[in-house]
Image: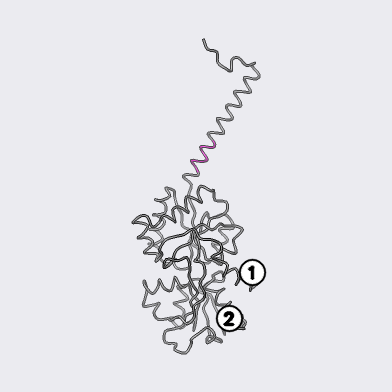
Amino acid sequence: MTQNTTDALPSSNRRRWLMAGGCLAAAGLIGLSRKAHAANSKLRVGMTPAFLHDQHSLLDEWRDFMAASLKRPVEFVQRDSYRETMDLLQLEKLDFAWICDYPYLHLKEVVRLLAVPLYQGRPYYQCHVIVRKDNTVARSIADLGGSVFAYADPYSNTGYLSPRYEIRQLGRDPAVFFRKTFFTWSHRKVVEAVASGLAQGGAVDSYIRDTLVHVEPALALRTRVIWRSPEYGFPPFVAHRSVSAEDFQLMQRHLLDTTKTEAGRRLLARLHLDGFTVGSPALYEGVARMMRAFGEA
């Protein structure tokens, strides 16, 4: 008869062997439990307040598409300002977020670049300074000195940093260049403020204004562009640095593969995007340079 291995051990050693085996088994069960929890845990995704704020059906479609693709519960989290989304990332209340390039550089110690949207086939966009269409006098930012001007958000590149940098390049002080400035907290609302005459000029994301030309031409075409900035890296998707390597790769692959399904292509068409690319932090050097000019980086 074959003797059990533990029976050949002294009783004290046998107890230690059994305890060690039990601990290893328990550790294995805990590891499996954690993996199961990770596989089923909700992914929290912060969404830019820039354009999608009023597009509830689009957000619902995107969330459902993402959850089905990832096979994980997904929660979209929206706030009314970039600062609020930045705070949620710093507090680890978000796993991923679609944010502006300016906040991305502010949070470079907190987040990692995940993917960059492709707009008109390229990972770039611009600042557009706009005036009312019936304003036939203004031809550049210089012509708006002493006027009322609408900014989008103090943490928006195209809606704040870029036009202020251009004013500085003109040898003027952006703090006193305009008679009055105010924040609308949305690029769409910048367009509304200018179109309605509440502001004589405003700074807006080119992607958002171009999209509004398609979806709300009655609003967008009441304005015209008088200045276009250099190109900047498109507002990126980022991952909090606490996100596991597995979840990082899962979300990145999901975004990169959006063009591969009919549902994904339909979603991209509604977003007026062409897909996503891995991108590089080098895309955002132009924004970093403007930040350094204002002593911010």
Magenta segment, which residues?
A: 30-37
* Quarter that holds the C terminus: bottom right
Residue at the spot 48% in from the left edge and 72% down from the top edge: 205
Q: Secondary structure at mark 1?
A: loop
Determine which residue is flagged by label 2: 167
**Magenta span: chief secondary structure:** helix
- Location of residue 271 in the rendering, given as x and y in whole percent from the top left corner: 40, 64
**Residue 206 versus residue 99: which sits nearer the camera?**
206
Q: Are marks 2 and 1 in contact (CB under 8 Å)?
A: no
Hey, what amino acid is under mark 1? Glu
Is residue 76 in the magenta section?
Answer: no
Q: Residue furthest top?
A: 1
Determine which residue is flagged by label 1: 296
Residue 275 placement, left or right of 236: left
Residue 65 placement, left or right of 292: left
Residue at the spot 58% in from the left edge and 77% down from the top edge: 165
